[in-house]
Image (cartoon, rainbow, N blue to C red):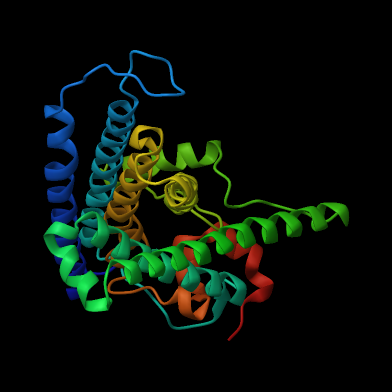
Amino acid sequence: MTGGFSRRSAGSIIVYAIVSGFCLSWLVLLVTIPMLTTTFSPGTLAGFPAGLDWAYLSNLFFQVLITVLILFAVAHNGLDIVSKAARGVVRVEQGPKVKRFDLNQRVQHVWLFTTTAVLAVTGFASLYYEQWGRVFIDAIGGEAVNFDIHLLAALLLGVLVVYHFAFYTAQYLARRARGEPAPLPIMLGRKDVSDFLQNLRFMMGLGKAEPSYGKYDYAQKFDYWGIYWGMIILGAPGVLLWMFGYSFLGGVPFIFHTDEAMLAVLFLGVFHFYQAHWSPRDFPMNKVFVTGTLSEREMKDQHPLELERAKPEVSG
């Protein structure tokens, strides 16, 4: 639903400007400048072909990836926030409710963001121990305690990942075995590419209408797969670090673990939180992750194709 420019829009712009400004400063100082100023030096690493500095190449890969993804996220959401604020897009919570997420999904989400937050704080406190990390680590009882908390949170997150994919794989196979429809709405497809291009034109004022989305739009799918891809890139090297130490394979697992952690935190700040909570439509918070429902009008505005499928589940 649209109206005039509102305080919600102003709050959205201010918060996102602050967060994206912080993340872009972090990006420039700790990623982009080192990427442009570090000199390549050929070297050797046991188990790898000679003549290449694999630690340098691994770090360079992540520096380029982080720079491209974060700049894309800021540009995309910058267009979106201007478009929504100018049109006065607002949320309409009144009216019949449509079930969007069940209890299982909501519990998994709380599990995910709780363990991720603990991992981010304890991990970066250790990485930046000589800056601000020492204060935090000393406050909770020392480096051993910080490491134990980090390890426990990593274990719990790993359990969640295994449960998540096992549960939905079993559900999919069971439906197929019964001959029932087994759609996978979270999978990326060609429609997501066309939706992205159509929405890009719309945000730039070159198109007449937003795309019609199903259960998930292209940004939500990109967000989802980015998160779970990141867990694998973080988790596997993390296990190697725990078993063999930071110098294992010339420090390549350490680079994968820490650089992917940086990408994850920056991406959460400039993309996920905006898409989930800080856009003018949802600011300051979308409560669907708590309630599991959206109003029928919200579904019509954001996920009209899913609304048609979910009509029988609409409740007063």
Residue 209 at least partly seen: yes
Pick the front one: 21 or 31: 31
Image position, residue 108 (x, y; %)? 54, 69
Residue 1 at least partly seen: no
On the image, which quarter does residue 314 sit in? bottom right
Q: Residue at x 40, y 33 (%)?
A: 249
Q: Is residue 304 left or right of residue 89?
A: right
The outermost residue toward the right is 178
Pick the front one: 198 or 55: 55
In this figure, what is the number of numbered marks? 0
Q: Residue at x 64, y 70 (%)?
A: 311
Q: Vertical placement of 252 versus 41: above or below?
A: below
Pick the front one: 205 or 52: 52
Q: Residue at x 19, y 40 (%)?
A: 31
The outermost residue toward the top is 51
Image position, residue 303 (x, y; %)? 50, 60
Q: Is residue 130 left or right of residue 143?
A: left
The outermost residue toward the bottom is 316
Q: Is residue 313 left or right of residue 285?
A: right
Pick the front one: 163 or 88: 163
Q: Residue at x 27, y 77 (%)?
A: 140
Image position, residue 282 (x, y; %)? 33, 70
> Quadrant of the image for the N terminus?
bottom left
Image position, residue 125 (x, y; %)? 24, 62
